[in-house]
Amino acid sequence: MDAAEKVRWFEGGFGLLYDRLLSRQVRQDLLPTHVAIVMDGNRRFALSSGLQNDQGHRMGKEKVREVMRWCRDTGIKYLTVYALSIENLTSRSPQELATLFDLYESGFLELCDDREIHRDRVRCKAMGQIHLLPARLITAIEAAERATKDYDDLVFTVCLAYGARQELVDAIKGILSDHRDGKIDPDSICEELVSQYLYTHDMPDPDLVIRTSGEERVSNFLLWQMAYAELCFIDVYWPAFRKRDFLRAIRTYQGRRRRYGR
């Protein structure tokens, strides 16, 4: 048996048993309610595998669907993924952006009629500077949000044209506007009030933030919300992210003592 055959045997045989063992272990401890993921490494995965960039992005899209299943199987209630930063709108080429917009559009439209989504009562939505996206993509997002608006077993949020600094700017503008209208007394402004003006006002802060590809930075993602989150950086490109990587991240979270400043 050569090295490649040994890897295939491990992944298909022993690997599945290992994944089941990890699944049982993490269910016996406190699970994170909200997992947020910076999905990094699609292009580098494609380059390292001799593929075109668009193939890396397509594989990355399918990986999202896998991770959604892992969350449902494990009992995670909120999954938020960072798909496109507001900076990407100007830093990526028009050709790459067109590919990404196509993938996001088809992805949201698929969610509308996906039997698993409706069976498992998954609410799907997007957040960010959505108005900056192409009209066809906005229409697809709105369709998926309407189709799943009554579900709450898993809340799946895609961050598109998103930037945490811009989110805070928008929150400040909202607070100032309501202050001008006499709805807010400046002395009443506190952390809880600020949180009510964020895009994430209707969900808990993330307990666990995962970033793939080996990079160790947060890249303008959920800066306010991740104040007390556990961070886990995984040295694997997003399309190659495995269930055991996901479960190990949860196990790492469970092994840390969360003090919240105490």
Image (cartoon, rainbow, N blue to C red):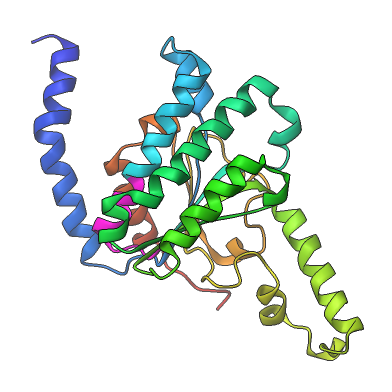
Tell me which secondary structure the magenta stretch mostly adopts.
Answer: helix
Q: Is residue 35 visible?
A: no
Q: Is residue 146 above or below residue 203?
A: above
* Residue drawn at 50 percent across, 73 percent down: 259
Q: Is residue 262 above or below residue 105?
A: below
Residue 176 in percent (x, y) is at 87, 75
Residue 119 in percent (x, y) is at 25, 60
Residue 252 in percent (x, y) is at 36, 54
- Quarter the N terminus occupies: top left
Residue 70 magenta: yes
Residue 172 magenta: no
Q: Is residue 231 above or below residue 180?
A: above
Residue 235 in percent (x, y) is at 44, 33
In-front residue for pair 197/99: 99
Residue 74 relative to residue 249: left or right:
left
In-front residue for pair 123/59: 123
* Residue drawn at 49 percent across, 59 percent down: 145
Q: Image quadrant of residue 32?
A: bottom left
In-front residue for pair 192/148: 148
Q: Is residue 6 above or below residue 115?
A: above
* Residue drawn at 54 percent across, 74 percent down: 260
- Quarter the C terminus occupies: bottom right
* Residue drawn at 52 percent across, 39 percent down: 105
Q: Is residue 51 visible?
A: yes
User: Magenta region: which residues?
Assistant: 67-78
Name the residue furthest right.
Answer: 180
How many numbered tags mark residues here? 0
Residue 139 relative to residue 86: left or right:
left
